[in-house]
Amino acid sequence: MSTVPQIRALPVPDGLEGERVDAAIARMFGFSRTKAAELAAEGKVTVDGAEVGKSDRVTAGAWLEVEIPAPPAPVQIVAEKIDNMKIVYDDEHFVLVDKPVGVAAHPSPGWTGPTVIGGLAGAGYRISTSGAAERQGVVHRLDVGTSGLMVVAKSEHAYTSLKQQFRDRVPEKRYNALVQGHPDPLSGTVDAPIDRHPSSDWKWAVVAGGKPSITHYDLIEAYRAASLLDIKLETGRTHQIRVHMSALRHPCVGDTTYGADPTLAKRLGLTRQWLHAVSLGFQHPGTGEWVEFTSDYPADLARALEIISAES
């Protein structure tokens, strides 16, 4: 892999006359506005050879040049032992794990903690070699702070089948979430597009023009300070449940990233968002038959429910 930065230059089209530099970069080169602003702040953007800032304006026909840093070195998979990662099901096609909180789906830049892929390698599992090197076999993911069911392909056929099923929205993914307050209505659908947060590369938000995102929710039980919801995803965007619940002004309890009150989480003994992938169903890649698996609440989430139930 090359360690040399890449230089890209294009003339500003007529339609971007007068646009801010960061907006023009985003449109012309496909970066997020945040990343474009970072490149400008680092002195990596010029217009007709002169360095510019993110809020400067561009002129049609001017040459906009961007220095793109070399990509980081590939992340290596490290075999490791994860005692609390349960294997729910295993055959020659796939392995289904009950992912504990604090474990990422796969290695990524900046993450030094345990991963599902590393845990499977440490347990002697051989998984599909399809996909990027650091996420081989991974057909869908759960957040580090979300626990529950996750399937990993073992055979190349299973990877192709499962990946296509997730693209076609065939799998049924159900989550339970404890959210602050009481949504109105108590059962409903959130149909709101999601994209990267306009001011943060590591957060997501409801954004006009984002990717279509649909979340269905139903009340399981209402407590004095929160509601336990059964949630079904029709799409699978990053942080989708967390973003949509926050957009309803009822963030997942403990999810301070998306606006949750930290005092409630502390009272319930939570150090993460109350969100668990309770069931996952899909067509078996080998037989074509529908298979479905379920997961019980982990100890921290079950204890939080006991506390809030006693308070109600």
Image (cartoon, grey):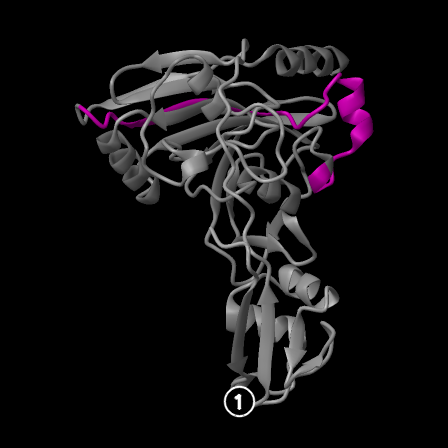
> Quick one: 59 or 189, which is closer to the camera?
59
Q: Is residue 215 above or below residue 221?
A: below
Pinpoint residue 297: horizontal percent, then vertical percent.
Answer: 55, 14
Q: Front-most of 117 and 182?
A: 117
Rendered image quadrant of residue 133: top left
- For label 1, count other residues whose C-alpha is less than 10 Å away and answer few (under 14), some (14-19) or many (20+): few
The x and y percentages for residue 201 are 64, 51
Residue 284: say if magenta.
yes
From the viewer's side, name the closer residue of 245 and 195.
Answer: 195
Is 55 drawn above or below residue 272 in the view shown?
below
Drawn side of residue 123 relative to residue 303, left or right:
left
Magenta segment boundaries in residue numbering: 257-286
Residue 92 in picture, x, y percent from top left: 25, 18
At mark 1, the secondary structure is helix
Q: Which residue is mark 1?
A: 14
Which quadrant does the C terminus fall into?
top right
